[in-house]
Amino acid sequence: MAKIGFIGLGAMGLPMARNLLARGHHVCGHDASPRAIQAWVDAGGAVAPDLADLVAGADVVITMLPSGPIVLDVFERGIWPYARNGQVFIDCSTSGVPSARRLHVAAAERGHSMLDAPVTGGVAGAEAATLTFMVGGDAKVFESMKDVLSAMGAKLVYTGGPSTGQAVKVCNNMAAGIIKIAISEAFVLARKLGVEDQVLFDVASAGSAQAFALTRTCPVPGLVASSPSSRDYRNGFATSLMLKDMILAQEAAMSAGAPTVLGGAATHLYQLCAGAGLGDLDNGIVYQYLLGQQQG
């Protein structure tokens, strides 16, 4: 079993680290939040006094942090100075393509193995170890890390060379964000035309508009009991996080010279939602925002 250093014990990182522990790996954790550290200790995890100690004692170092700039800063100040030959570094954060490229370059310059491995599946997937990993980097390193990654996820997808894991993640989330808005607009229009929500749902869910964002995370309350919209938009994928991913997709599109007209429009709408104080609620709240605009 591997000796793993896990940096970032938040809503996603904590259950991921717990699942590694449950699989029999030795896991030493670190987080800037005392509350997160206590939750990790309560789960039976070991704690490193600082990053230098964590990195020195690990074969594999995993990061699960809020943003690309934070990831880069942690690597620059807390990981690279203490890294040694033979270690593997895996960034599971949604840090964006440019950040992933910088990490891979820095790792190569120092002779270290690096994988960018963002995930999809949310907190529920992290808890149940059913996450999907999108993994970019050297194929042999990916193969060597399958046992570690499979302890946290049910599906491991090798996406190609360095930064392609992040590329797939931002493309997937951009599409998901656009689709959520399209479904929300359809329900707002149907309501304005005198069609009941359930009627449109019954038709769309069995027809060409069927989508995860309709049948699993429907933005209209009361149609799907397990959807965050039926729990006052709580415990879902926050609008602020969706906005972050949409911005990452736009940054990647600009650097690649790829037109993303709908992606740009969707990003603007999520910015409006966040600006209206809805950032902490599930991104399906965009339906309520659009409904309010129509009613206004």
Image (cartoon, grey):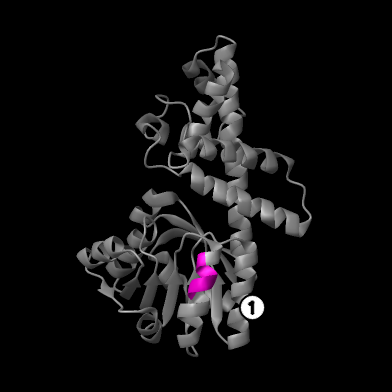
- The residue segment tinted magenta is 70-74
Q: Is residue 284 above or below residue 125?
A: above
Query: Along the horizontal axis of the image, is 4 left or right of 206?
Result: left
Q: Position of residue 190 (x, y in %)?
A: 58, 16
Q: Position of residue 217 (x, y in %)?
A: 46, 36
Q: Is residue 72 magenta?
A: yes
Q: Nearer the viewer, residue 130 or 193?
A: 193
Residue displayed at 58% across by 87% down: 110
Which quarter of the rendered picture does the N terminus lie within? bottom left
Q: How many marks?
A: 1
Q: Position of residue 157 (x, y in %)?
A: 55, 61
Q: Nearer the viewer, residue 294 or 150?
A: 294
Identify the residue under disc 1. Answer: 105
Query: Along the horizontal axis of the image, is 260 left or right of 33?
Result: right
Secondary structure character of the magenta stretch overall: helix
Does residue 171 show up? Answer: no
Give the SS element for disc 1. Answer: helix
Q: Residues within 10 Å of mark 1 (few under 14, many from 20)?
A: some
Q: Nearer the viewer, residue 228 or 152?
A: 228
Residue displayed at 70% across by 39% down: 262
Q: Position of residue 284 (x, y in %)?
A: 49, 34
Q: Is residue 131 magenta?
A: no
Which quarter of the rendered picture does the C terminus lie within? top right
Q: Nearer the viewer, residue 154 or 93?
A: 93
